[in-house]
Image (tube, rainbow, N blue to C red):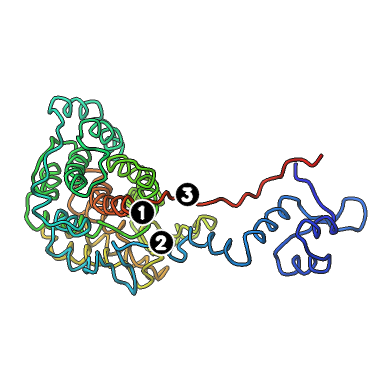
Amino acid sequence: MSTYLTAAEAAAALGISVPTLYSYVSRGMLSSAPESAGKRRLYAADEVRKLARRKADGKRAGKVAQKVLDWGVPVLESRITLIADGRLLYRGRNAIELARTATLEETAALLWECDQACFDAAPDAPIPSSAWQAWLKQTVASAPHERALVMLPAAAAHMPRLFSTGRQAQWETAPALLRVLAAALAAVPLSREPLHRQFAAAWGVRHRRHVELLRAALVVCADHELNASAFTVRCIASTGMHLFGAVTGGLAALAGPRHCGETMLVTALFHEAREAGDVDRYLAARLARTDIVSRTILPGFGHMLYPDGDPRAAVLLDMLAERAASRAERQALADIDSIVRAAYDATGLAPTVDFALSALERVLALPSGSAFSLFALGRAAGWIAHAMEQMEDGRLIRPRARYIGPDEPAH
């Protein structure tokens, strides 16, 4: 049960005068309630304590610390990725241009600051094929991310020099990690084939124009600065955990519905819109029941860092339109285009990379979960870069919390 303070008690807890307390109420900083018997106004002790601790943080520091955790000012220095003015740059290289020709391996080498020869020369993960097949059999009914969350830690136990922080050892571990993750997500044997071709073979993608789409998708997903999964990876790496452990943590964070798990929500959106028939009416009805608390408008639309539209989505959707050849592909793309148009007319929002990956999955008739797998494998290249950078920094990431609960009872 909440306890209440009188005006004098609340003012004393805040270190202010009673008139100043009244001004706090008028400015919306505090609320008050009438006493059940009497004419006084009372103040919730929890609310007073919360405001007092904010004041104790310092005039500005507490507010800044709170804002950096929600799309706020930069909180860590990094040389990996820049997002500014609608651009996405990997170590100064335009990621959208890279997506037109580069492989994920080439992009990873750029992010890790090694050359392609370093990637190619990296040894295979020394995992017995019998053990790998057993793990696949045990996880055959699992979703791709669930299977990878099981198999990455199991594979880590077979890796040599796992805890070595030397850059050469990391350059040997990192390519093996990507290959293990690709095989786990696709449920196939370990391979040294190019990563996008491994996915293509696993999913039955035969046309070169479609294989190129998988390659481009992996590249645009390679990194996106300090998002939830990358921050998770950096926190784990700062404790001294190895690359396999850090990437496993990133994968767990990625699977949440407010991160790449949003691809699942977009897939559901496609299905519902098609079943409804009238896309405009369907979206209008959906928008009418938008969850105001979570600020969800439509899954796959609107990105805080790209007010004019996500360039990753734009390049993938453009490439998809260029390569959709069969009648079924063109029809699926037309359905998707109608959703993009109707959503923009209704909200003014453009599609995000989550939408584009789900569109690719639908138009190419890829297995369920392929959009997530593309995102996860591509992003793992960036996670590894963040882990390496954090290990080089050497500091433990350990922020402080602002306590807003009750104090120990006074005696």
Residues at marks 1 and 3, CA–CA distance in whole angstroms: 49 Å
Q: Which mark is residue 4?
A: none
Quarter of the image with the N terminus is top right
The reply to whether discs 1 and 2 touch (Cβ–Cβ < 8 Å) is yes
- Residue type for callout 2: Arg
Residue 65 in view, yes or no: yes
Read off the residue under disc 3: 398
Read off the residue under disc 1: 276
133 or 368, which is in the foreground?
133
100 or 242, which is in the foreground?
242
Circle 2 crowding by C-alpha within 10 Å: few under 14, some 14–19, many from 20: few
Q: Is residue 403 left or right of residue 37?
A: left
Q: Determine the residue located farthest toward the right in the rendered image.
A: 38
Read off the residue under disc 2: 281
Q: Earlier in the sequence, mark 1 or mark 3?
A: 1
| Residue 168 horizontal/vertical position (percent) | 18, 48
- Residue type for callout 3: Arg
Q: Earlier in the sequence, mark 1 or mark 2?
A: 1
Quarter of the image with the C terminus is top right
Residue 327 in view, yes or no: no
Residues at marks 1 and 2, CA–CA distance in whole angstroms: 8 Å
Q: Is residue 315 left or right of residue 347?
A: left
Circle 3 crowding by C-alpha within 10 Å: few under 14, some 14–19, many from 20: few
Figure check: 304 above or below 6:
below
Report helix, strand or loop for mark 1: helix
Q: Is residue 245 left or right of residue 176?
A: right
Residue drawn at x 38%, y 64% is 303
Report helix, strand or loop for mark 2: helix
Residue drawn at x 34%, y 41% is 241
Report helix, strand or loop for mark 3: loop
405 or 241, which is in the foreground?
241
